[in-house]
Image (spheres, rainbow, N blue to C red):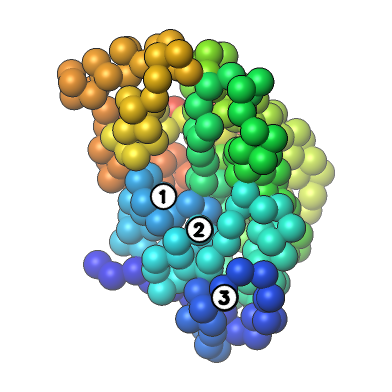
Amino acid sequence: MGFASWPLAGVPTVSAAPTPSIERTLGPKLPILMRFAILTGGSKGLGLALCETLAERGYRVLEFSRNAPHAHSVQIDLSSTRDSHRIAGAAIASLGGDNVEELLAINNAGTLDPIGPASRKEPAAILANLNTNFTSAILVLAEIVTHFQATACRKVLADNSSGAALKGYAGWSLYCAAKAGMENYIRALALEQQREPHPFIPVNVDPGVIDTEMQALIRSSLASDFPEIERFIKRKEQGALVQPVKVAAAVCRILELPALSFGARYEVSDHGA
């Protein structure tokens, strides 16, 4: 099944970075009720599988990523907070809220790079990691909440988390810090949303260990940067990595649960992946 996209009307011109991906989405808003999904990092891996799975389940999809490969993509560099905030804000502000019967917002974009102690990395690389995994993630989610806060429909806001949010890994200090920060951001946001007349339901979702480029990056790292590399190599050799399409289906099943708990943490392994 092909992708389902919601054409965006009246998107302002954005001067930062090339914007053909935004322009491709121009068009009239649809005058019918729809299920709508917004996610980051949908160009490959789990994000790509989520785009496909959400479309198959009847959602109209808007995807933000650097590569912006889909007709429903908006090109964005999440490592630059100024540009990501401006571009995401312009795209989201163009969306109407009156015709939405259900909204899923998924923070999926993430990077492990650079792997190794932060003390050995350039400041620019450190900032790029934290911007992608944490600061830009919050900026984009905040734009979504602001625009759709008054929309009276079922609204779920999910952060695709990691086991690295719960424990430290040598060589992943930046990734662990950002993932832990996002988990607690979701918990705090959940408390805030329960005070709203038309709340989002914020949740954390642990997608488990997936067979993606991120896992390939881990296996290609140096033991001096990541001491646990052999364990991850064995996971691949033993076939312990789950395919993205299976994880994406489990994520969607979780987000469509009729009784999601505000601020709760869900694991795809409990839902068929």
Residue 110: give x, y in percent of width and height: 52, 41
Q: Are marks 3 and 2 in contact (CB under 8 Å)?
A: no
Please report the residue visible at 66 percent of the width from the left and 58 percent of the height from the top: 84
Could you tell whether 262 is left or right of 237 in the image?
Answer: right
In this view of the protein, can residue 165 be seen by the observer?
A: no
Residue hosting label 3:
19
**Which dot, 3 or 1, sits closer to the camera?**
3
Give, as a three-letter code, the residue at label 3: Thr
**Comes first in the chain, label 2 or label 1:** 1
Q: Secondary structure at mark 1?
A: helix
Q: Are marks 2 and 1 in contact (CB under 8 Å)?
A: yes
Residue hosting label 1:
47
Mark 3 surroundings: few (<14), some (14-19) or many (≥20) residues within 10 A:
some
Q: Are marks 3 and 1 in contact (CB under 8 Å)?
A: no
Residue 107: give x, y in percent of width and height: 56, 46
Q: Is residue 188 above or below residue 119?
A: below
Q: CA distance from mark 2 to mark 1?
A: 10 Å
* Residue 128 lies in quadrant: top right
Q: Quadrant of the N terminus?
A: bottom left
* Residue 229 lies in quadrant: top left
Residue 194: give x, y in percent of width and height: 76, 41
Please report the residue visible at 43 percent of the width from the left and 55 percent of the height from the top: 42
